[in-house]
Every structure is written in structure tokens, then in C-alpha cells.
């Protein structure tokens, strides 16, 4: 089962982030300068030079490896803008802005940063841009090679600057570079290789068959030590021969980082979100703290102690930075507006952006002239039909299909515009709804055509269902007489004709053949009718799997259901979606209580779970009445709390569920548990639940209970 498998625990990266932040502070304060120049050089110019590449690699892993890069870039831009503003007063006071030509401003903004540590943000953004561009034109290996070439060019402007005089023409070239960027340690030469390595190592670490030595922690430590030793020698040799113009870039920094990063990935410990945020704040705030410590020392007359003793100075700046980082986190936590979900007990969150992207992705994939007719039956597969249809209306969708007249009426009552096709049988009792709410009824077979004619007191719009082999609803495709009869009925305004495919979701040859046959039968029927002068203005054939597996099928509409919600019916058939669709729905609940079980104590109905060891359990405010499949009981399913997995223990109750949170620290009543969706780096999909419950995603979703509140975020 997918959720039982432990997923990668990348907490090591979070811990190392804190260490890296402390190293960056060291670079800017030279703690060992009093001990000896050599010791200080080793600490700040060699050891601490692993910090920024590490941060770049983490960024590469989490930004480049996933979709939605632009969203991350926007975040980086915002962060950059915020820190520029934060340091503007200090920068002005320190006279950083005395030279203000447009060139100088550009140089500061794009390469140097407006304050001395801020170069990191534009470097990240430029580096990400360069890699995205390279990936468009080159295969993977050439992208890496290009990044390495850029790094080598950078080396010559940095640690190996002294070699330039031996290369004809090189000095003039670098002279030019230095007019636009003060260093080659920037987004162009320095950042790309580490960003890209982060992406590769992060992604491949999880896959089988990757270069296995990198998964062996001992070997990583050994290799890192060896390469770091070489890097140390490299640094001291370069220093001895006075070749360095700057000291951020070394040849052996790259292999050192590959093994260091792989080692940290191999730690496999739970994520620590707060450390992640804390380290980011330390990085942002520490230069301010340097200024603050200097100022305080001057005012208080502690200069000799606080500033002149480098180690004390470092300790003061570090403590101050961590304290102010913690304070900033506390302030932001307070200032954060309450989340707009109802969230009292158990609820569904809908991702507006994901839905919009899915609509655009699917619409683009349809043949020319074909439009989406989303299936919003069964409360939009449990998502909430009104919320979904309203959003779709806003995105320009003008046609929907539902299963029943009541479903169509509910949409109209809530102001949904456009055509609404009722796909199923409507009893004569309910025909008033069809008329009143201007719905389109399906003629489900010949006899139903007669029934409609008899019970309608006025004409209504209909689509004819054609049975091409599913043998569910529809007029048999070859019963020409039946079609003539239906077209002859005065009260039926025939606006469309459609069929439904029943074997389009696999790639088995017999299924492909059957689907092809269904399509041929349908198109032949439509042609025959047109030849006889019967109008067929809207024709439709494909549902989700038709769109995915038979993109060539023509039609005026595609009745897309499950794919619109960003999931497939099953993970089992091994069919990968050819389109990048995003899940729209998350299912969440609260922790109601946390308690401890001693070995031998049981929990839940039927004493199904008995603790083997000291166990911490949490009771969640969701049960099978909310649609959580009861089949997930007894360790079959899992939920996410604070970014960690907790497996379901005992039997799922009607309104409550018990999970094992022994491995997760700080779980408290009121915490949010994710049953479908993401938490930290972890994700549980509706497909996972479907596998565990031995059904398809459609069933899991459409059974999500009425009791759940639904919000579009
Ligand atoms: C439910 C339904 C659809 C939508 O199916 P998906 O596989 O979810 O896209 C389309 N057409 C008919 C007739 C349906 O009943």
C-alpha cells in the first residue's frame, strides 16, 4: 500500500539549514580572526563556503523539481523586495547608494544585491531562469555541462583570478564582467550548478537504480572528507600564491557538496518546519544584528569587549540573530490572518488555482472546436457542485452535465449559467424541473422518447444517447427506425447526440479495438442521420479517459469528469496521465484528543488494536459517515499531521478515527490532520485511498459526506 511505505524524511536538510545559517554569520563576523589568520581563513573562507551552495541546492531540489516554478520565483521576488526595503535605511546610512546611475542600480539589483548578503536572492532567481532556459534547449547532461562551464568561467573571476594574466585577452573580458557584477559569485556563474545539482540529487535520491554509492551514508562521509580535504589544500595553496580575487568558488567545492548533500539526504529523519523558517530569518536578519551589536557596543561603551574580541562578537551576533529570528516568527504567527476555512471539525478545501489550470490544460488538449462540458454530477464528484460550477462559469465554461434533474435544478437555483444536460433518466414527476430550470434532458432510449412526448405539456431541449456497445443507456446505434421516430416527435427539440465509451481507460489491445469500434459506430450513426436531413448540432463522445487516451476523437463537447478534478480513476492500470493535472480537493479534520496507551491496552471498537509498546494516539474528528472508507481501518490507511504520517489504528467509527502519532512530536488537540492532500513534503492522494479501499478514486470522492464543509481557497 502506498501510504504504508515510508516516504522520504528530509528533516536533515532542515537541521543543516540552521548550521549553514550559523556559518553564513561566521563569514560576516570572522570569529577566529584573533586566534590566527589561518584559522579564520579555514573557517570563513573554506568551511563556511559550503553554506550558500547548500542553500542553493535545497532551493534547486524544492523549486526546480516540481511544477509551479513561477509561484516560487514570485515568492523569492517578494522576499527580495521585502529585504531590500528592510535594509534600505542601513544602506543609505552606510552610503551604499551614493553612486546612483541606472547602470549601478541594475548592477545592484540583478547581481550584487542592495545589501551585502542580499545577492543571494537575485542569484537564485537568475540561476533558476538560466536553468529553465537551458532545459528548454538541451538534454539533461548538456544542462549540467553548461552549468559546470559557467562555474569554471566563474572560478577564473574568483579564486583563480591570478591565472588570468596567463590567458591572453582574458583580463579584458573579466574587466567587462566586473563592470556589471562585482563578483563572479552570482546568479550567472555560481548559482546554476548548485541549483541543478540540488534538483538532480533530490529527485534521484528517491529512485531505484540511482548511483547507489550516493545512498550509502558512510561512503558519502568518507568521500566528503576526502574532497573537503582537497578543497582545504586548494584554498591554502591559492592563498599562498595570492591568486584569489575573491574566495567563494573552488574546484573541489562541487564534489564536496555532492557528497555532503547526499549524506544529509540519507539521514532520513522527520521534517522540522520551524527550523526551516528560523534559518531563513537568521539569514535575512543577521546583517542587521551586526549593525545592532556595533551600535549597542558603541552606545554602551563595550567596544573593547563586544566588537574587538571576534569570538564574543560572533556569539553576540549569532545569539541576537536567532533571538530576532524567533521574535519575527512569533510576530508573523500573530499577524497571520485566521485561515478562511470553516475548519471546525472536518472539511474539504478546493484549490482554485489547480482547477483553473486543469481547465486550461484540458481545453488546450481538445481538438479544434471542441469545448469542455464538465461533469458536475454527484456534487461534482464530492467537491461541491455549486462551488465548482460557479468557479467554472467564471473561467468561461458554458456547459455542464449532471446525473439528475434535481442536481441541475440545484445549480440553477444557485445562479449557474449555461447549458445543463441531465445525463440520466428523469421520471415524469420530475419533468417540471427540466422545464422550470431550462435543463436539457437525455433521451435514454426509444421508449423514453414516447414517454416524454406523452407527459410533456410543452417542448423541451434534448440530447439523444446512442448505445454503441456499453449497453447502459441509449438508442441502439443501428436502429435507424428508432432515430426517425425520435426526430419525428414534436415536443423534442433535438440539440445534441452523444455516446459513452466503456473501455477507454486501459491500453489492452482488445479494449482499444472495442473503443475504436464504438467511435466508428457513433460517427457512422451521426453521418447517416445528417444524410437523412436530421440535424445533429452538438455531438459528444469523450469523457476523461477519452480525452487522455484518444485525443483524436472529434466532437463539439467533451464531458470531462474525474480528470477535471486533477486525478485519475485508478493508479492500478499503470496509465500515466499524459497531461499535468493537479488535484483540486483536500480533505482535513481536527485532532480532538491525544492520549497514551501502555503496552497491552486496546483502542476502538472490537479491541481491534492492542498497543505492543508505549503508544501515543490521536482521535480525529472524521469518520465513515463523512465518506472516509471504513476499509482504511486497522493500519490500512494513514493521515498526515504536521508533515508526518500517522497510520489509522483500530476500526474507523461513524464520526471519529484513531491514529498512531507515536513518532510525531507536539501533536495537540486542535491540530489539523490531512486525509487527502499535502502536509509539508508529504502527500496522500485520493488515489491512495482508493487503492486501500479497493475501489476507484471516483467512488472515494463522490462518497465524501454532506456533513463536510466545503470551501474554495
Ligand atoms: C460520469 C459521466 C461522464 C464523466 O466521466 P469521467 O470519466 O469522470 O470523465 C461522462 N459521460 C457520462 C455519460 C457519464 O455518465
Image: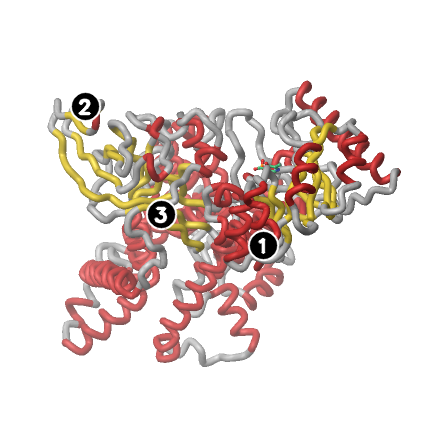
Q: Earlier in the sequence, mark 1 or mark 3?
A: 3
Judge from the rendering whether residue 388 lies leftward or rightward of residue 579; answer left or right: left
Q: CA distance from mark 2 to mark 1?
A: 52 Å
- Residue 513 is marked as none
Nearest-to-viewer mark from 2 and 1: 1
Vertical placement of 86 versus 497: above or below? below
Helix or strand or loop: what does disc 1 sit on?
loop
Q: In the image, residue 614 lies at what x, y percent?
A: 14, 29
Residue 439 or 128: which is nearer the viewer?
439
Q: Which residue shows up at 32% across the image and 54% down it?
A: 277
Q: Secondary structure at mark 3?
A: strand
Q: Is residue 229 visible?
A: no
Q: Nearer the viewer, residue 522 or 32?
A: 522
Give residue 630's quadrant in the image: top left
Assign ligand 1 to one image quadrant.
top right
| Secondary-structure class at tag 2 | helix
Q: Which residue position is annotated with label 3?
A: 347
Compared to 477, does 51 lie above or below? below
Relative to 334, say whether 133 is above or below. Answer: above
* Mark 2 lies on residue: 607
Asked if the residue at tag 2 contacts the one at tag 3, i.e. Cβ–Cβ closer than 8 Å, the answer is no
Q: Is residue 701 left or right of residue 529?
A: left
Using a 10 Å C-alpha cutoff, classify the residue at mark 1 as few (fewer than 14 neighbours), some (14 to 19) or many (20 or more): some
* Observer-nearest of 2 and 231: 2
Q: Earlier in the sequence, mark 2 or mark 1?
A: 1
Residue pointed to by mark 1: 437
Q: Disc 3 and disc 2: Cα gap in Å?
A: 28 Å
Which quadrant is home to the N terminus? top left
Is ligand 1 within 8 Å of the beta carbon of the residue shown at mark 3?
no
Q: Nearer the viewer, residue 185 or 712?
A: 712
Amino acid at each position: 500500500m502506498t501510504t504504508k511505505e515510508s516516504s522520504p524524511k528530509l528533516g536533515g536538510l532542515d537541521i543543516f539549514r540552521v548550521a549553514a545559517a550559523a556559518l553564513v554569520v561566521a563569514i560576516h563576523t570572522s570569529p577566529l580572526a584573533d586566534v590566527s589568520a589561518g584559522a579564520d581563513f579555514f573557517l570563513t573562507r573554506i568551511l563556511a563556503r559550503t553554506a550558500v551552495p547548500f542553500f542553493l541546492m535545497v532551493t534547486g531540489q524544492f523549486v526546480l523539481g516540481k511544477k509551479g516554478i513561477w509561484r516560487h520565483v514570485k515568492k523569492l521576488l517578494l522576499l527580495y523586495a521585502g529585504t531590500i526595503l528592510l535594509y534600505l535605511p542601513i544602506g543609505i546610512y552606510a552610503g551604499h547608494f551614493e553612486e546612483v546611475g541606472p547602470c549601478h542600480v541594475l548592477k545592484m539589483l540583478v547581481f550584487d544585491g542592495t545589501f551585502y548578503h542580499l545577492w543571494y536572492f537575485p542569484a537564485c532567481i537568475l540561476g533558476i531562469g538560466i536553468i529553465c532556459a537551458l532545459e528548454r534547449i538541451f538534454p539533461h547532461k548538456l544542462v549540467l555541462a553548461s552549468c559546470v562551464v559557467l562555474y569554471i568561467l566563474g572560478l577564473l573571476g574568483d579564486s583563480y583570478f591570478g591565472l588570468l594574466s596567463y590567458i591572453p585577452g582574458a583580463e579584458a573580458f573579466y574587466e567587462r564582467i566586473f563592470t556589471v557584477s562585482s563578483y563572479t559569485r552570482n546568479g550567472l556563474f555560481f548559482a546554476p550548478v548548485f541549483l541543478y545539482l540540488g534538483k538532480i540529487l533530490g529527485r534521484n535520491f528517491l529512485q531505484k537504480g540511482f548511483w547507489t554509492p550516493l545512498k550509502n551514508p558512510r561512503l558519502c562521509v568518507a568521500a566528503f572528507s576526502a574532497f573537503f580535504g582537497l578543497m582545504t589544500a586548494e584554498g591554502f595553496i591559492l592563498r599562498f600564491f595570492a591568486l584569489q580575487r575573491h574566495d567563494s568558488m573552488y574546484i573541489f567545492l562541487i564534489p564536496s557538496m555532492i557528497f555532503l548533500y547526499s549524506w544529509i539526504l540519507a539521514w532520513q529523519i522527520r521534517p522540522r518546519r520551524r527550523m526551516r523558517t528560523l534559518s531563513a530569518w537568521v539569514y535575512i536578519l543577521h546583517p542587521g544584528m551586526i549593525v545592532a551589536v556595533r551600535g549597542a557596543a558603541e552606545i554602551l561603551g563595550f567596544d573593547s569587549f563586544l566588537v574587538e574580541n571576534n569570538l564574543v562578537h560572533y556569539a553576540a551576533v549569532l545569539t541576537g540573530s536567532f533571538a530576532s529570528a524567533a521574535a519575527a516568527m512569533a510576530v508573523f504567527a500573530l499577524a497571520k490572518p485566521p485561515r478562511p476555512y470553516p475548519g471546525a471539525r472536518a472539511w474539504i478545501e478546493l484549490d482554485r488555482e489547480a482547477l483553473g489550470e486543469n481547465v486550461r490544460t484540458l481545453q488546450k488538449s481538445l481538438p479544434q472546436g471542441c469545448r469542455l462540458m464538465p461533469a458536475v454530477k454527484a456534487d461534482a464528484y464530492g467537491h461541491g457542485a455549486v462551488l465548482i460550477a460557479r468557479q467554472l462559469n467564471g473561467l468561461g465554461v458554458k456547459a455542464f452535465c449532471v446525473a439528475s434533474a434535481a442536481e441541475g435544478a440545484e445549480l440553477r437555483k444557485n445562479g449557474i449559467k449555461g447549458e445543463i444536460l441531465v445525463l440520466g433518466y428523469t421520471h415524469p414527476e420530475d419533468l417540471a424541473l427540466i422545464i422550470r430550470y431550462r435543463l436539457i434532458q437525455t433521451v435514454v432510449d426509444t421508449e423514453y422518447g414516447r414517454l416524454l412526448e406523452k407527459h410533456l405539456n410543452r417542448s423541451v431541449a434534448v440530447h439523444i444517447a446512442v448505445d454503441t456497445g456499453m449497453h447502459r443507456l441509449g438508442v441502439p446505434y443501428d436502429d435507424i427506425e428508432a432515430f426517425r421516430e425520435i426526430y419525428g416527435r414534436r415536443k423534442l427539440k433535438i440539440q445534441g447526440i452523444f455516446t459513452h465509451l466503456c473501455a477507454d481507460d486501459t491500453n489492452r489491445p482488445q479494449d482499444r479495438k472495442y473503443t475504436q469500434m464504438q467511435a466508428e459506430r457513433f460517427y457512422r450513426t451521426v453521418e447517416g442521420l445528417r444524410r437523412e436531413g436530421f440535424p445533429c448540432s452538438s455531438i459528444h463522445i469523450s469523457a476523461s479517459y477519452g480525452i487522455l487516451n484518444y485525443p483524436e476523437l472529434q466532437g463539439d463537447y467533451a464531458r470531462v469528469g474525474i480528470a477535471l478534478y486533477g486525478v485519475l480513476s485508478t493508479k492500478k492500470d499503470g496509465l500515466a496521465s499524459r497531461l499535468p493535472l493537479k488535484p483540486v480537493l483536500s480533505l482535513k479534520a481536527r485532532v480532538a484528543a491525544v492520549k497514551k496507551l501502555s503496552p497491552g491496552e486496546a483502542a476502538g471498537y472490537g479491541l481491534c488494536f492492542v498497543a505492543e509498546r508505549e503508544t501515543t494516539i490521536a482521535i480525529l474528528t472524521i469518520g465513515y459517515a463523512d465518506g472516509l472508507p471504513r476499509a482504511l481501518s486497522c493500519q490500512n490507511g494513514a493521515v498526515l499531521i504536521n508533515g508526518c504520517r500517522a497510520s489509522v489504528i483500530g476500526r474507523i467509527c461513524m464520526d471519529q478515527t484513531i491514529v498512531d502519532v507515536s513518532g510525531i512530536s507536539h501533536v495537540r488537540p486542535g491540530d489539523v490532520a490531512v486525509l487527502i492532500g499535502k502536509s509539508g513534503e508529504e502527500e496522500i492522494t485520493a488515489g491512495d485511498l482508493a487503492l486501500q479501499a479497493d475501489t476507484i478514486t471516483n467512488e472515494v470522492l463522490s462518497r465524501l459526506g454532506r456533513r463536510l464543509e466545503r470551501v474554495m481557497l
